[in-house]
């Protein structure tokens, strides 16, 4: 699948630390740019997703994304279903050579998984969000803005994810149909919880 949608360099390796330096240094290793929009707290409720989660070599991220999106599309087609929701990518951990990455799509509660694609859910509750406009080469600035946002006394819980508002899996995945990167809208989402729930 051509045209990788995101870079592994801003992956969190410390899921429950409060915006640690290690987390942010990895997030912005190669991606530089200024924050593009405001950061807000929203209530997130995504009760059901189809997803593929793999541990892959960092150099294989593009192939991983392609396989995952194609598998999710195939699963929907097999069940005679479709989704108008936006795909997301979530990085659970990363080191110098490997990354644990999840590619998924919100779906209706009638959708089931199969041998390749799993069913799960995302966060229900408050989340710090930041909407980034433009190329993913400037996502570093967006992640910096997310880390500096006012979380109202709440703390991060779990890995953040990126929702690609410029991309819907309502047809066979084809990068040649994607809009110009300058028009991309990418929502960064960091789940939050009270400090006494962050390790639960």
Image (cartoon, rainbow, N blue to C red):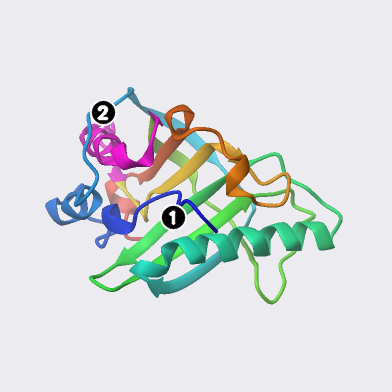
Bounds of the magenta segment: 132-155
Q: Could you say which disc has been placed on residue 35 in the image? A: 2
Query: Residue 148: where, in percent of width, then height?
Result: 20, 34
Q: Does the magenta segment cover residue 148?
A: yes
Question: Between 182 and 72, which is closer to the camera in this rendering?
Answer: 182
Marks 2 and 1, how far apart at CA: 20 Å
Query: Residue 17: where, in percent of width, then height?
Result: 22, 55
Q: Which residue occupies 25% across, 31% down?
A: 149
Please say if 188 is above or below 12: above
Question: Between 49 and 153, which is closer to the camera in this rendering?
Answer: 49
Q: Which residue occupies 36% across, 44% down?
A: 192
Labels 2 and 1: the sequence-earlier one: 2
Query: Residue 88: where, in percent of width, then height?
Result: 52, 48
User: What secondary structure is marked by label 1?
Assistant: strand
Please say if 27 is above or below 135: below
Q: Could you say which disc has been placed on residue 90 in the image? A: 1
Farthest residue toward the front?
176
Q: Which residue occupies 42% across, 63% down?
A: 61
Q: Which residue occupies 71% across, 52% down?
A: 172
Residue 176 appears in the picture as rendered: yes
Please say if 138 is above or below 36: below
Q: Does the magenta segment cover residue 112?
A: no
Farthest residue toward the bottom?
115
Query: Residue 74: where, in percent of width, then height?
Result: 74, 62
Circle 2/circle 1 CB separation < 8 Å: no
């Amino acid at each position: 699948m051509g045209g990788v949608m995101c870079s592994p360099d801003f992956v969190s390796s410390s899921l429950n630390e409060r915006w640690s330096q290690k987390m942010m240094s990895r997030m912005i290793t190669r991606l530089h740019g200024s924050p593009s929009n405001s950061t807000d707290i929203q209530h997130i409720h995504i009760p059901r997703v189809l997803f593929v989660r793999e541990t892959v070599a960092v150099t294989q991220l593009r192939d991983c994304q392609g396989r995952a999106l194609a598998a999710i599309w195939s699963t929907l087609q097999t069940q005679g279903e479709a989704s108008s929701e936006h795909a997301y990518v979530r990085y659970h951990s990363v080191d110098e050579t490997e990354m644990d990455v999840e590619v998924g799509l919100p779906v209706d509660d009638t959708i089931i998984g199969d041998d390749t694609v799993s069913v799960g859910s995302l966060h229900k509750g408050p989340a710090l969000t930041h909407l980034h406009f433009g190329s993913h080469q400037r996502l570093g600035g967006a992640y910096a803005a997310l880390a500096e946002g006012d979380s109202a006394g709440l703390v991060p819980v779990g890995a953040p994810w990126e929702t690609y508002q410029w991309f819907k899996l309502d047809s066979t995945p084809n990068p040649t149909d994607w809009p110009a990167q300058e028009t991309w809208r990418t929502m960064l989402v960091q789940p939050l919880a009270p400090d006494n729930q962050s390790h639960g």
